[in-house]
Amino acid sequence: MWSQPDVIVIGGGLAGTEAAWQLAQRDLKVSLVEMKPVAMSPAHQTPLLCELVCSNSLRSDEPVAGAGLLKQELRRLGSMVIDAADAHAVPAGSALAVERFGFGREVTQRLARHPNVRIERRVVHELPKDTPTIIATGPLTGGRLAAQVRELFGGDKLFFYDAIAPIVAADSVDPEHSFRASRWGKDQSELGDYINCPLNKEQYTEFVREVAAARKVEAHGFEEMRFFEGCLPIEVMVSRGEDVLRYGPMRPVGIEDPKTGRRPYAVMQLRPENQYLTAYNLVGFQTRMAYPEQKRIFSLVPALANAEFLRFGSIHRNTFIDSPRLLGPSMELRSQPNLRFAGLMTGVEGYVESCAMGLLAALFTEARVRGRELALPPETTAFGGLYYHICRERPASAPFGPTNINFGLLPGIEVRAKKPVRKKLIAERAFHDLGPWLEEVQPIAAR
């Protein structure tokens, strides 16, 4: 085994593992430093690398959706993480959902067996000074490392709150008050990819009323509550109006109850959490309600009256940096170019986005080690949209916050057509424009 690495990657999440793989496949020696199991955060359950909090963290797989387009580009770039996700996919309609533990084992094994990767299980207290380093420690970065990161910026970190949805046992969902189907009939399995739990108007009204009155887990007095708009706790949505849930996670559009032949007034969808279909995630029901309140209130949904909760929802703080002000054009820290940041800390939100920024940070790092320049991703691509979100300079008065990949990050297209047609054309343009950049990047094998 080699002694000194060419690159150090700190953090074994989606960004860190993707970065390590990309660098190793390009014949660079990589030390991948992961604190688990020496230290575990509130979101960790296993010592596996690339641990996900829910099965559908990778979201839509359709190219006319932002996450689907980004995954399409990741596959063309030889993403190891997305390849492993494809290998452990579970039925979820048009989404890419995975069996979490199989996925984590796959990623861990691939990296452990790679001759150019050394996995170091330890807590990092001091940032390396001379070796090129990618910091991909994620939104829960803490301890002395967090203090060091804060000192690099000369100010406080930014943060928002991210909430996790509950999981229930499949056999505890009442089949008499539920049915299986995907929205618009886009099932990948004969059984039906989602379990749908319909509510009539009276049931929905009672559910909303109880959520509004429920006891919540409050933040510490020194913490300001700032939620990411794309992952709001249901109680925050309820506070904005009685019908917000019906236009959000409980929207019944595209769903027909076979028992009545009609669309429900509202519906809660449950999505497979593992390949055995024994556990299901409450789609979109992130929450900071107290555990007893969660059990009581979710049990008001007829299909969940006797539900067994395998995991209750919880809340945790996410941390990100002011990337447009702090990072240079190759994602390097302006004040210390040997350091690069990747993943959620850069100001992207979502696992797919984190993976993409890990891959991009690896490409920039490899170019620096080899002494060459790397062309920037075209801004008409999903990669380009995310890159320019975090690296394009903006006025000091312009606020910066995390975002998922979305078509609003890409240039519009001049055509008079309905939104679905415009999205299709934007996706086709992205696919075409990525080609020349791929020739320079020279994608590597995902296995």
Image (tube, rainbow, N blue to C red):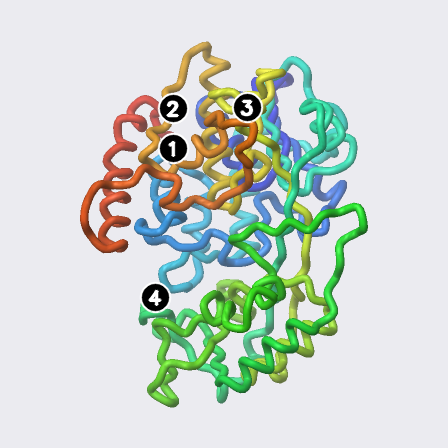
Answer whether labels 2 and 1 touch (C-beta < 8 Å). Answer: yes
Answer whether labels 1 and 4 touch (C-beta < 8 Å). Answer: no
Looking at the image, the residue that sits furthest to the front is 397
Q: Is residue 309 above or below residue 390?
A: below
Q: Residue at x 73, y 24 (%)?
A: 151
State the residue in front, 138 or 5: 138
149 sits to left or right of 165:
right
Q: CA distance from mark 1 to mark 4?
A: 31 Å
Residue indicated by mark 4: 188
Q: CA distance from mark 4 to mark 2?
A: 37 Å
Q: CA distance from mark 2 to mark 1?
A: 8 Å
State the residue in front, 261 or 51: 261
Mark number for residue 192?
Answer: none
Residue indicated by mark 3: 327
Q: Residue at x 68, y 51 (%)?
A: 225
Kind of residue at badge 1 = Gly
Answer whether labels 3 and 1 touch (C-beta < 8 Å). Answer: no
Residue indicated by mark 2: 376
**Closer to the observer: label 3 or label 4?**
3
Write down the quadrant of residue 445 in the picture. top left
Residue indicated by mark 1: 384
Kind of residue at badge 2 = Leu
Q: Percent from the top left, x then y, of residue 241?
A: 55, 69
